Image (tube, rainbow, N blue to C red):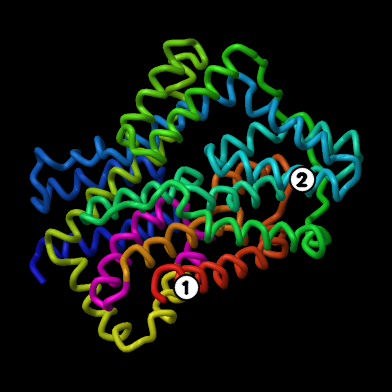
């Protein structure tokens, strides 16, 4: 390997360690990647920050603004309250209503925002029905992740995977391509929850002073932002406009019409995700251009090339499911996707198949509080402990691994 390849590989390993250990903010890690690569002449200084305008990054950030408007206008609160109140008359009803509405909303909206929006609504229903709030909160977190598996825009990691596929000159996933894998996982998980998993939900004391207020409802703006969101989905489904253009137009419209203020639009940005994903896109390009990625792939493909395709699919899914419980899903996606594409090429397996394994697997952070925004959001407010996630979440991680492996093999490789 060249000196540049060795430098890139060392930085790649250092990023993984830093993301797991978390001694510094992800912003610092993401911003530091192009700086270090430019200083050591691995990439040209003029191109070091070019990935910060990547279309995937633009799409992701624009969609967060539109999602923020849906929350700010009270539309998400309204939908959530109607569904949860419809089913929430006893413990099973409250849990079922919570799981169903958060799954439906997080399939189309940011999972963390959906969870935060539904906390006050579910809390009010829970207190009225005398259902443990800690149980409600962990269901909110888990099913926000499960809902995110169902569509292209449901999980932040899905958009990262999409970006890497397109960067590698492959056609991206269609809007509803995730349904045939994500929906069965969500359905099996819901059935497990209602018949078996409900008894594994922890009962903890909750400090009710930490529960946020619901948004003020603005009916006219609720209708307008709903139409804007449907327009974006329509553009994605029909390819009327490029995804990032449609999302950016939607973000522009919700701001100029007052559905969300410019200040709140900026606050809705996930700055950590922006810097980290853009930085790792830069690192991925460097891994490819210097030959570092090819070295790693050659080392692994020698073993994997003799394996049955379903074994390769299972290994990629397993690494994704296990890894996402110790690292934020979008970060892990950005690391694993380019590698999985190259492994697929080397082993003669569809890169789409392995990319799908990464997208779904990195949404399965059910066993620790660390892997997703929703898990972290309810960790303190629900008075939850580390073991509460592991005890309740392990079955959902297993369902994800088994169903994803089988479905990806059947739909992509048979």
In this rendering, which labeled residue sits more in front, label 1 or label 2? 1
Q: Quarter of the image holding residue 344?
A: bottom left
Q: Quarter of the image holding residue 107?
A: top right
Q: Principal SS element in the magenta part?
A: helix
* The label number, if any, that marks residue 410 in the structure image: 1
Q: Residue shown at 41%/23% (left/top)?
A: 251
- Asked if residue 199 lies left or right of residue 383, the reply is right
Is 163 placed above or below 14 here? Answer: above
Q: Residue shown at 32%/83% (left/top)?
A: 304
Place of residue 338 in the rendered image (x, y in percent of width and height, measured from the top left) = 29, 60
* The label number, if any, that marks residue 136 in the structure image: 2
Q: Residue shown at 60%/18% (left/top)?
A: 222
Identify which residue, 377 or 409, lies in the foreground.
Answer: 409
Place of residue 28 in the rendered image (x, y in percent of width and height, measured from the top left) = 34, 42
Identify which residue, 93 or 362, lies in the foreground.
Answer: 93
- Asked if residue 105 lies left or right of residue 133, the reply is left
Give the crowd class for mark 2: few <14, some 14-19, many >=20 residues within 10 Å.
many
Q: Secondary structure at mark 2?
A: helix
> What range is drawn magenta here?
320-349
Q: Quarter of the image holding residue 359?
A: bottom left
- Asked if residue 389 lies left or right of residue 319, the reply is right
Look at the image and say whether residue 42 sits in the magenta stretch.
no
């Amino acid at each position: 390997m060249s000196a540049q390849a060795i430098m890139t590989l060392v930085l790649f390993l250092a990023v993984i360690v830093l993301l797991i250990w978390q001694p510094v903010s992800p912003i610092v890690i993401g911003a530091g990647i192009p700086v270090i690569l430019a200083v050591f002449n691995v990439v040209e200084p003029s191109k070091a920050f070019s990935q910060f305008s990547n279309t995937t990054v633009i799409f992701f950030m624009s969609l967060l603004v539109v999602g923020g408007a849906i929350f700010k206008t009270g539309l998400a609160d309204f939908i959530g309250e109607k569904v949860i109140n419809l089913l929430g008359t006893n413990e099973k009803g409250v849990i079922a209503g919570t799981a169903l509405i958060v799954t439906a909303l997080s399939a189309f909206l940011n999972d963390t925002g959906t969870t935060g929006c539904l906390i006050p609504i579910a809390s009010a229903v829970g207190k009225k029905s005398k259902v443990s709030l800690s149980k409600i909160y962990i269901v909110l977190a888990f099913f926000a992740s499960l809902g995110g598996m169902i569509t292209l825009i449901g999980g932040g990691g899905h958009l990262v995977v999409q970006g890497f596929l397109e960067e590698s000159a492959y056609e991206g996933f269609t809007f509803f391509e995730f349904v045939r894998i994500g929906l069965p996982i969500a359905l099996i998980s819901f059935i497990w929850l209602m018949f078996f998993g409900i008894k594994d939900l922890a009962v903890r004391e909750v400090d009710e002073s930490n529960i946020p207020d619901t948004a003020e409802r603005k009916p006219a703006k609720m209708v307008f932002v709903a139409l804007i969101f449907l327009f974006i989905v329509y553009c994605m489904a029909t390819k009327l406009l490029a995804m990032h253009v449609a999302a950016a137009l939607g973000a522009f419209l919700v701001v100029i019409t007052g559905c969300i203020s410019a200040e709140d639009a900026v606050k809705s940005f996930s700055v950590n995700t922006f810097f980290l994903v853009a930085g790792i896109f830069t690192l991925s390009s460097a891994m490819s251009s210097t030959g570092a990625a090819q070295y790693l792939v050659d080392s692994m493909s020698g073993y994997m090339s003799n394996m049955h395709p379903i074994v390769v699919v299972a290994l990629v899914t397993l690494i994704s499911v296990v890894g996402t419980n110790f690292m934020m899903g979008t970060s892990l996606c950005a690391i694993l996707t380019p590698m999985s594409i190259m492994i697929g090429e080397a082993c003669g397996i569809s890169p789409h198949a392995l990319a799908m394994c990464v997208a779904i697997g990195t949404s399965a952070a059910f066993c620790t509080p660390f892997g997703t925004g929703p898990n972290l959001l309810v960790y303190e407010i629900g008075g939850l402990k580390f073991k509460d996630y592991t005890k309740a979440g392990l079955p959902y991680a297993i369902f994800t691994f088994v169903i994803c492996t089988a479905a990806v093999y059947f739909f992509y490789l048979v």
